[in-house]
Image (tube, helix red, strand yellow):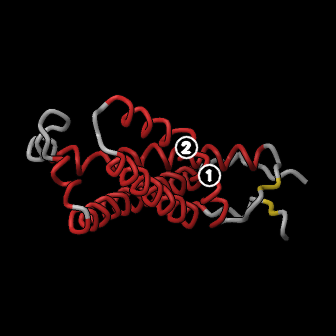
Amino acid sequence: DRVSTQSTGPTAQTTMSQKFLVSTVLCGASNLLVQVFIQLYFQINHPSIEDEYKNAATFRPFRISLGYFFIQPLVLAAFFVLFYSQFEQLVVRLDVAVPFYKTAHGLYFTHLFWVTAVLPQEFHTFFTFQISHKLFYFSLLQSFVATTLMGLLVSKVYGSDKLKSRVE
């Protein structure tokens, strides 16, 4: 009773393209919003973080990196959605019973992504730049919340009925 993942025809391609585009825009926007709101929270409650960001020896001035600030969440979201779609197809193709279903499956992928891709980068940044522990923890929290929200959103858009669940 293997489920075929081979979809052919222009309708299947359009649907996948639409899912990719919608997921990327939703995830990119949510990632940007998380960055802005967590940044504001920490700037209000922990002003030393803003001072650290203004340190020209560590970070470029915000006005120079402003374009990157808005583009980076969208680029990250596009790769995240691409990896998620490939991960989901692999799970279906291998006929694996995933430990969770739909939304929780997105969270399962998200946490794998965060631990294997984001967390090592966070540690690299911490050990390479002279940043405080507070900024490091802030960055960890921000990336975890952003990727978790992206996982929830992409699982809603891609939510496949082909995924088997161990709880069904």
Is the C-beta separation of discs 2 and 1 under 8 Å? Answer: yes
Residue type marked 1: Phe
The residue at the point 53 percent across, 57 percent down is 15
Query: Which of 146 and 159 lies nearest the eye of the viewer?
Result: 146
Quarter occupied by the C terminus: bottom right
Image x and y of residue 72, in percent: 30, 45
The tally of labels here is: 2
Marking on residue 124: none
Q: Is residue 152 left or right of residue 31?
A: right
Tell me the quarter of the picture where residue 57 sits: top left
Q: Position of residue 55 (x, y in %)?
A: 14, 41
Q: Nearer the viewer, residue 134 or 53?
A: 134
On-image quarter of the N terminus: bottom right
Q: Which mark is residue 109?
A: 1
Q: Earlier in the sequence, mark 2 or mark 1?
A: 2
Q: Nearer the viewer, residue 19 or 147?
A: 147
Residue for point 10% across, 42% down = 61
Instruction: Give residue 140's position: percent from left, percent from top.
Output: 43, 51
Front residue of 76/116: it is: 116
As helix, strand or loop, the secondary structure at mark 1 comes to: helix
Label 2: which residue? 83
Q: Position of residue 90 (x, y in %)?
A: 71, 43
Q: How busy is the neighbourhood of tag 1: few (under 14 within 10 Å), some, or many (20 plus)? A: many
User: Residue, x 50% and y 64% (percent of image)?
Assistant: 153
Single out the mark in the foreground, 2 or 1.
Answer: 1
